[in-house]
Amino acid sequence: MTGSAPPFTVGVEEEYYLVDGTTGDLVPEVPDGFVADCEKRLPKQVTPEFLQTQIEIGTRVCSNAGEVRDELCRLRGEIADVASSYGLGMIAASTHPFGTWHGQQHTRKDRYDLIHDQYGAPARRLLICGMHVHVGIGDDELRVDLMNQFSYFLPHLLALTTSSPFWEGEDTGLKSYRLTVWDGLPRTGLPPQISSWHEYERMVAQLVSAGSIEDGSKLWWDVRPSVRFPTLESRIYDVCTRIEDAVTIAALTQCLFRMLWRLRRQNQRFRVYPTALIDENRWRAMRYGLDFGLIDFGEDQVKPMDLLVDEMLEMIAPDAEALDCRDEVERSRDIVRDGTSAHRQLAVWRMLCADGAEPEAAGRGVVDMLMQESLIGVSPSARASG
């Protein structure tokens, strides 16, 4: 198979919560001037999210994981610094430990007004934050082919990112409760198996013609061809509280796409499993995170995450070398050993409850931990501000 290699550039989008710097409560209405100040510092790299208590950042196009790290440190630091000047803090997590969607104000933009009006209560409940990873793959047919194969790995990567164990002050029993909220909207979840770029374009055109969507950006699948960029956009991830975890996920995503392309160059491909089977692993990752493993459909048995991660790292070893991110992908073993943000949040909450704290007070302790961890690695001035 001929043709030049895709660029495999990488970019990351993250959404954060804005909280009261003293109480840790969500801020239902963003202060006047806050967004403008953020945009002044980070032109074209920051935007309001659906709810005013959220803010979204996007890295520049990066060639490797080291550049992603630098970008996330800079972006988080700037947001935290601006937030501090308004008496606010920021946290990188996919649900707030005790916040409630009732009373939250959505951002007044045409796109968000439409979502608010069109989808009713499921939209109003979107008090969730996510992380998206874009990988540069310009060829349309290649994007569809790799998307079909990459879906297998989505639950594995979700399990490494979980940061949403709480909902409205309660331990949900899930490591990623966020997706139960997100899945209330249409056109979410795993993508369908699509045979060609033409089939994808025809699907989008039919939905647009029927008035269901305005364009392909309303296909909110766990991975999709980006409408704005020549990329495949992986969207299943919870927000990683620690920057180093986010860098690891970006590197793994980049390497997995390159591995699938490399197989294609050798006239091979990763087996495409039925969506219903992958969905079973998606649920296991939501429910248990790293704790009880995922199903290996080649062997029809549940395997522990440490073994699955070892196998994945072996598969992508040549790609990690080519993309100069061996250390970053190897760090996925540390995540399996030490746990995700969800594990650390639950540990703090349970410790404080065991010491006699009421649930909301314990939740405030979790917010304190999240505010600190979200700024590990940024400049000292930004850490002090947070």
Image (tube, rainbow, N blue to C red):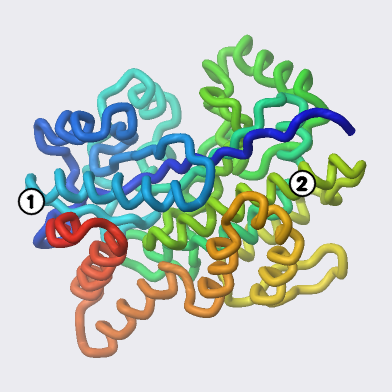
- In the rendered image, the quadrant that contains the C terminus is bottom left
Along the horizontal axis of the image, is 247 left or right of 216?
A: left
Label total for image = 2
Q: Could you tell me which residue is drawn at 17 percent across and 47 percent down?
A: 27
Q: Quadrant of residue 317?
A: bottom right
Q: Could you tell me which residue is drawn at 49 percent across and 66 percent down?
A: 175
Q: Determine crowd level at label 2: few under 14, some 14-19, many 20+ residues with C-alpha closer than 10 A.
A: many
- In the rendered image, the quadrant that contains the N terminus is top right
Q: Please, which residue is most extreme toward the bottom here?
A: 355
Rendering coords of residue 325 (x, y %): 57, 57
Per the image, label 2 sits on a secondary structure element best described as: helix
In the depicted view, which residue is nearer to us: 129 or 229?
A: 229
Q: Amino acid at mark 2?
A: Leu
Q: Could you tell me which residue is drawn at 46 percent across and 43 percent down?
A: 12
Rendering coords of residue 114 (x, y %): 39, 22
Rendering coords of residue 177 (x, y %): 47, 59
User: Which disc is residue 87 wearing?
Assistant: 1
Per the image, label 1 sits on a secondary structure element best described as: loop
Circle 1 or circle 2, nearest the eye: 2
Q: Amino acid at mark 1?
A: Gly
Along the horizontal axis of the image, is 139 left or right of 90?
A: right
Is the residue 298 above or below the residue 107 in the image? below
Q: Please tell me which of labels 1 and 2 falls first in the chain.
A: 1
Along the horizontal axis of the image, is 182 left or right of 28?
A: right
Along the horizontal axis of the image, is 293 left or right of 83?
A: right
According to the picture, the residue beneath numbered tag 2 turns out to be 260
Rendering coords of residue 65 (x, y %): 50, 51
